[in-house]
Image (tube, rainbow, N blue to C red):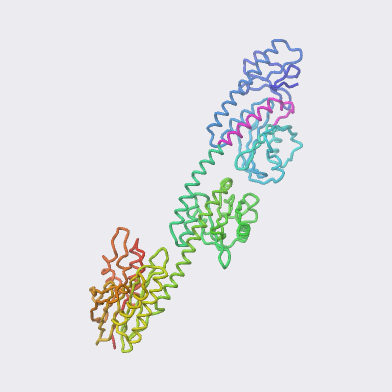
């Protein structure tokens, strides 16, 4: 018979150790072959009282049991102290397994870690090999494995080893050391997982009340410790996740350029979240890989090829796009694809992948895929990954919408400008226009060139105050009014006067500045006459590189009914260039607060030294490169005189 303490009540058959043997630190333990002596560095001497034992023997047996209980209580208290400071439940393993292995009759202690039917690893100690060994498995045993998952509070069950599935790794370990029976206690752990603690014995009688109770006790310590660790980690992860998502949003929102945003998404995630990242977008031509990153530069090319060509990955992404739900794959779920142990090359290192849909403003834009070299990284991270995917989708959608609007604005702006400049004998014309406002409202800058029947050309450049639809309407009115009047033979003064009257009649609160220059052949060069209505003064770049400012003051258009225009004249020899521009050039500002106006002359000298065909474009590009602030558009119109004849 076995008593409540698992020792014996005087009716068993264990031999009584002598007093001298006990003093020598020996005790008796039952093995497969019978009773044998063991070292007393375990829970204390194992003493069983025979029938008819003397009172002295019974007294010594009681003392032995009390010593054993004291030893266990001390070790259990120590285990709780370890559990309080443990950073991971596996930190309890050495103490926990050692305590159970020292129980009478125990031949092996085996622990397994599961997620459903997926066995992650197996840890074991045996009397032959008391040092803990860990074997990573990562194999899905389906219903066979999931059947052992705890349904309620931890409970101890007893099994015959011969009745269990011999293909299971823990059964093989137990059978290898001669165990015939096992006691098992399964407990739930964090991240929807569970663990099983098993002790194997040769004799079923060894699995007594004491052994069962103690097995349950250490299992409960592991469970409570895991709950505390999981709660602490969840709080830490929540704080880190919130901070990371905030920083990721700032990084991804820092650019309105689509390409830059896509690259930032991938760079933000690797290696902070996973070892690899791939971003696909749903485009009219189909699902397309648009950005990817891997922490190993040597695997970048491999990942890019997989993202663009692999049929298995494409099908997985389409599944996510169709359902709108995230997908996580590991273990057997990776079979047939380019990832996991069954694959070849760089893909063998990938233990798991997660795919999240990119959803923004009610639309599914594509997918965000992460590659993990550690399978546990993908567990319990669904909410965080969904949050990151949402932020990435919003940043991408904002960049895409911005780019679309930018194209529309540029298209509209181009319709307010001449499709091409005319070919004028003896003059090389060049023009440039740059949109400056990040809000993408249509600007009011315009330019045009009207050939003269007698030779030469009339140039016009203007700027409507403000931006938006009204500014665009006035831009079209101003440009087409001036062009039509000049084509019909009106003088620049008359054309400007008629435009002023039209603007005053409109009753608009916006004003317009304008500059008109007439270039007529004059010997080997051209004579130029110009009229200004409140517009920035043009510059004359001479062939030798010197620059002159052509001052001409005048009143703004659209403000007063009677206005005066400033005018002047100048001669252009071959190689000289008349440079006209809007105030977006002079008012562009660098990060240190300096205006481009301070270096305008130097840039005119520098950019005019190149070919005449791209003079205006080079000058506009110099302004764009210079400015850090300034929301005004840039318009530049240049006429360079060439030799005639």
Q: How many marks?
A: 0
Task: Locate residue 26 relative to residue 455 in the image: left or right.
Answer: right
Tell me where residue 361 appears, x and y as whole percent: 54, 59
Q: Residue at x 43, y 76 (%)?
A: 415
Is residue 24 or residue 475 the one in the foreground?
A: 475
618 sits to left or right of 59? left
Residue 169 visible here: yes
Residue 239 position, x and y percent, is 49, 43
Range shown magenta: 200-228
Residue sitting farthest toward the top: 55
- The residue nearer to you, when weighing 419 against 461, is 461
**Residue 451 lies in the magenta stretch:** no
Which quarter of the figure is the N terminus placed in? top right
Res 323 quadrant in image:
bottom right
Q: Is residue 101 above or below residue 420?
A: above
Q: Position of residue 41 (x, y in %)?
A: 61, 22
| Magenta span dominant secondary structure | helix
Q: Say left or right for 280 vs 564.
A: right
Q: Nearer the viewer, residue 185 or 639?
A: 639
Between 408 and 376, the one nearer to me in the picture: 408
**Residue 544 as seen in the image, left or right of residue 222:** left
Q: Position of residue 590 (x, y in %)?
A: 32, 61
Magenta region includes residue 222: yes
């Amino acid at each position: 018979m076995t008593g409540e303490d698992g020792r014996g009540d005087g009716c068993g058959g264990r031999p009584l150790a002598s007093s001298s043997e006990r003093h020598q630190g020996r005790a008796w333990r039952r093995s497969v072959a019978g009773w044998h002596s063991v070292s007393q560095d375990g829970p204390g001497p194992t003493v069983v009282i025979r029938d008819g034992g003397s009172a002295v023997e019974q007294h010594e047996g009681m003392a032995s049991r009390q010593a054993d209980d004291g030893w266990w209580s001390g070790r259990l208290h120590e285990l709780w102290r370890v559990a309080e400071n443990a950073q991971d439940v596996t930190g309890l393993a050495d103490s926990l397994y050692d305590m159970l292995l020292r129980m009478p009759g125990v031949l092996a202690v085996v622990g397994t870690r599961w997620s459903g039917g997926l066995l992650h690893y197996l840890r074991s100690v045996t009397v032959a090999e008391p040092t803990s060994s860990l074997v990573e498995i990562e194999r899905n045993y389906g219903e066979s494995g999931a059947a052992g998952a705890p349904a309620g509070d931890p409970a101890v069950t007893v099994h015959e080893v011969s009745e269990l599935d011999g293909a299971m790794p823990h059964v093989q370990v137990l059978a290898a050391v001669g165990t015939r029976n096992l006691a098992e206690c399964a407990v739930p752990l964090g991240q929807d997982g569970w663990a099983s603690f098993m002790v194997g014995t040769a004799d079923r009688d060894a699995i007594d009340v004491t052994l069962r109770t103690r097995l349950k006790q250490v299992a409960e310590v592991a469970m409570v410790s895991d709950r505390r660790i999981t709660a602490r980690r969840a709080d830490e992860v929540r704080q880190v996740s919130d901070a990371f998502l905030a920083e990721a949003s700032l990084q991804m929102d820092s650019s309105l350029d689509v390409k830059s945003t896509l690259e930032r998404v991938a760079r933000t995630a690797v290696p902070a979240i996973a070892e690899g990242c791939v971003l696909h977008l749903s485009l009219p031509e189909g699902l397309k890989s648009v950005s990817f990153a891997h922490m190993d530069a040597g695997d970048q090319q491999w990942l890019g090829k997989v993202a663009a060509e692999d049929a298995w990955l494409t099908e997985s992404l389409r599944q996510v796009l169709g359902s709108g739900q995230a997908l996580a794959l590991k273990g057997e779920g990776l079979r047939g694809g380019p990832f996991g142990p069954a694959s070849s090359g760089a893909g063998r290192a990938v233990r798991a992948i997660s795919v999240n849909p990119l959803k923004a403003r009610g639309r599914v834009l594509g997918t965000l895929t992460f590659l993990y070299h550690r399978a546990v990284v993908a567990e319990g991270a669904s909410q965080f990954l969904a949050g990151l995917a949402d932020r990435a989708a919003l940043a991408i959608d904002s960049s895409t919408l911005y780019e679309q609007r930018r194209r529309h604005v540029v298209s509209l702006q181009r319709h307010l400008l001449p499709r091409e400049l005319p070919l004028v004998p003896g003059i090389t014309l060049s023009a440039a226009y740059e949109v400056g406002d990040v809000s993408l409202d249509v600007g009011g800058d315009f330019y045009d060139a009207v050939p003269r029947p007698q030779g030469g050309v009339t140039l016009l450049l203007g700027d409507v105050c403000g931006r938006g639809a009204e500014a665009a309407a006035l831009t079209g009115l101003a440009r087409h009014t001036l062009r039509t009047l000049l084509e019909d033979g009106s003088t620049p003064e008359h054309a400007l006067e008629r435009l002023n009257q039209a603007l005053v009649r409109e009753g608009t609160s916006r004003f317009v500045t304008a500059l008109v220059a007439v270039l007529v052949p004059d010997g080997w060069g051209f004579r130029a006459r110009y009229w200004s209505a409140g517009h920035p003064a043009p510059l004359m770049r001479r062939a030798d590189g010197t620059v002159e400012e052509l001052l001409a003051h005048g009143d703004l258009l659209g403000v007063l009914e009677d206005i005066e225009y400033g005018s002047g004249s100048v001669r252009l020899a071959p190689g000289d260039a008349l440079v006209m521009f809007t105030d977006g050039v002079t008012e562009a500002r660098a990060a240190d607060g300096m205006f481009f106006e301070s270096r305008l002359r130097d840039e005119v000298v520098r950019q005019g030294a190149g070919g005449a065909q791209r003079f205006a474009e080079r000058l506009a590009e110099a302004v764009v490169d210079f400015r850090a602030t300034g929301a005004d558009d840039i318009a530049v119109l240049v006429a360079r005189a060439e030799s005639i004849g």
